[in-house]
Amino acid sequence: MKHCSKTIFILLFLFTGVLFSKISVNLGIQTGVNMANATVDNESVELENRKGFIMGGIMEIEFNRFFAIQNELMYVQKGAKISPPFSGLFVGTRIYDYITFPILLKAGFGFSKFKMNLNLGPDFGVRLKAGLKTEDGTFYDYSDRTNLIDFALDLGLELSYRIKPGIILFSGLRVSGGVIDVDNDPSNVWLSNGVLLILGTKFTL
């Protein structure tokens, strides 16, 4: 029994050593567009996409060529274009701007310099700005009726190309689905959604 336990311990030690010996850390920047929209509980409301800007930094921890974790710090513009009777009969754009903190699990495969990753994980957001911008340019601040925190689940696909050792270019398509109602008004439900188109570069430390 002792001999068996010792053997298992040695195997686990060797496996852990091999796993962590292949860890690499990539830092990078990314930018793109968020085709933002929302899920609401009012069937008479017509919503159109708000084309929002996104930008931020990433830290990717690669455990091996197949598995990684990516932490991000992003500025993301969410919201949607709306029409009556939502939002006090004003026609305009609901604006929700956030600092977000996605934490993504990445499963990848590829060959040579090319790689494809499937990304999945939670996305936490802290509100910077909330309001309604009407067609004449007037802005109504909704900070007092909007939750400070947003939470979403992200699912995406990323393609990357290593142009030379230590430098990686990548592009991605990500779907973000809101889980928290960000509107404090009990008569309205607003779940922020979006389709993100992303371009960026990473540098291996």
Image: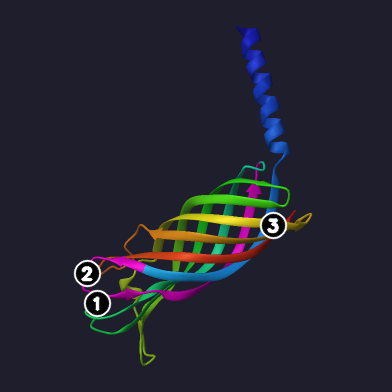
Q: Type of residue at label 3?
A: Tyr
Residue 42 circle label: 2
Give the residue displayed 24% in from the left and 77% down from the top: 86
In the rendered structure, which segment of residues is drawn in magenta? 38-63
Q: Main secondary structure of the magenta part?
A: strand
Q: Looking at the picture, tell me which residue is in the foreground, 51 or 6.
A: 51
Q: CA distance from mark 2 to mark 1?
A: 8 Å
Q: Position of residue 157 (x, y in %)?
A: 54, 55
Which residue in the structure is indicated by mark 1? 86
Q: Position of residue 48 (x, y in %)?
A: 36, 75
Q: Type of residue at label 2?
A: Asn
Taking the view exactly as shown, the residue that stands out farthest to the front is 111
Give the residue displayed 25% in from the left and 74% down from the top: 45
Which residue in the structure is indicated by mark 3? 161
Q: Secondary structure at mark 3?
A: strand
Give the residue displayed 37% in from the left and 90% down from the top: 138
Is 50 included in the stretch rendered in magenta? yes
| Of labels 3 and 1, the one closer to you | 3
Q: Is residue 174 left or right of residue 30?
A: left
**For marks 3 and 1 on the same chain, the one whose residue lies earlier in the sequence:** 1
| Of labels 2 and 3, the one closer to you | 3
Q: Quadrant of residue 186?
A: bottom left
Q: Secondary structure at mark 2?
A: loop
Q: Secondary structure at mark 1?
A: loop
Q: CA distance from mark 3 to mark 1?
A: 45 Å
Q: Residues within 10 Å of mark 1 (few under 14, many from 20)?
A: some
Labels 2 & 3 near each other (Cβ < 8 A)? no
Question: With respect to residue 204, does 17 lie above or below?
Answer: above
